[in-house]
Image (cartoon, helix red, strand yellow):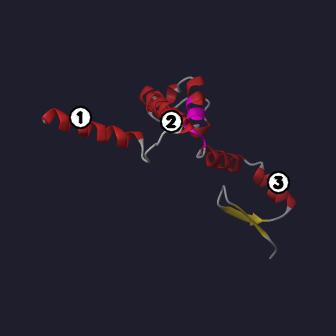
């Protein structure tokens, strides 16, 4: 039967020989799957910088869908999405600065902290 090659990015297997492997590794589906895999590990600052440099996708804004999907050269993020991403980047930068200064940073997210702060403020106003 011969050896088989399994591609973790594409979740596919095929007969392993030089021709088949080369054809698969240079194929569009494999390159897309590989790019999607590595995009999962990018930090928010890199994503924000890339999205801000792109123009908005007209078709996506009008219809909510784009034929090119993640391969589109235009941005599919709305203004609200960009603002949320920008806030996340600023929060991460503040956290990094606090850690460099040696301050004790409690575990959790910014949303958790804001929620606790709002509860404390409302409790203080009630008293």
- Mark 1, Cα crowd under 10 Å, few <14 / some 14-19 / many 20+, is few
Q: Are marks 2 and 3 in contact (CB under 8 Å)?
A: no
Between residues 11 and 52, which one lies in front from this camera angle? 52
Splitting the image into 4 quarters, where does residue 87 fall? top left
Q: Which mark is residue 121?
A: 1
x and y percentages locating residue 85 in the rendered image: 48, 33
- Residue placed under numbered mark 3 in the picture: 22
Q: Are marks 1 and 3 in contact (CB under 8 Å)?
A: no
Looking at the image, the residue that sits furthest to the front is 102
Q: Secondary structure at mark 1?
A: helix
Q: What is the magenta segment's predominant secondary structure?
A: helix
Is 79 magenta? The answer is no
On screen, residue 124 versus residue 27, left or right, reads: left
Q: Specify whether residue 113 is in view.
A: yes
- Residue placed under numbered mark 2 in the picture: 98
Instruction: Between label 2 and label 1, give the one nearer the viewer.
Output: 2
Looking at the image, the residue that sits furthest to the bottom is 1
> How far is disc 2 from disc 3 in space, using C-alphas?
48 Å
């Amino acid at each position: 039967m011969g050896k088989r090659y399994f591609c973790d990015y594409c979740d596919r297997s095929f007969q392993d020989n030089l021709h088949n492997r080369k054809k698969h590794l240079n194929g569009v589906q494999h390159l897309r799957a590989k790019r999607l895999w590595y995009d999962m590990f990018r930090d928010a600052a890199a994503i924000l910088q890339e999205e801000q440099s792109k123009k908005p996708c007209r078709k996506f804004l009008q219809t909510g869908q784009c034929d090119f999907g993640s391969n589109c050269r235009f941005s599919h993020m709305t203004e609200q999405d960009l603002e949320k991403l920008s806030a996340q980047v600023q929060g991460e930068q503040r956290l990094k600065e606090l850690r460099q200064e040696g301050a004790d940073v409690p575990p959790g997210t910014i949303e958790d902290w804001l929620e606790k702060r709002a509860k404390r403020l409302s409790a203080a106003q009630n008293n």
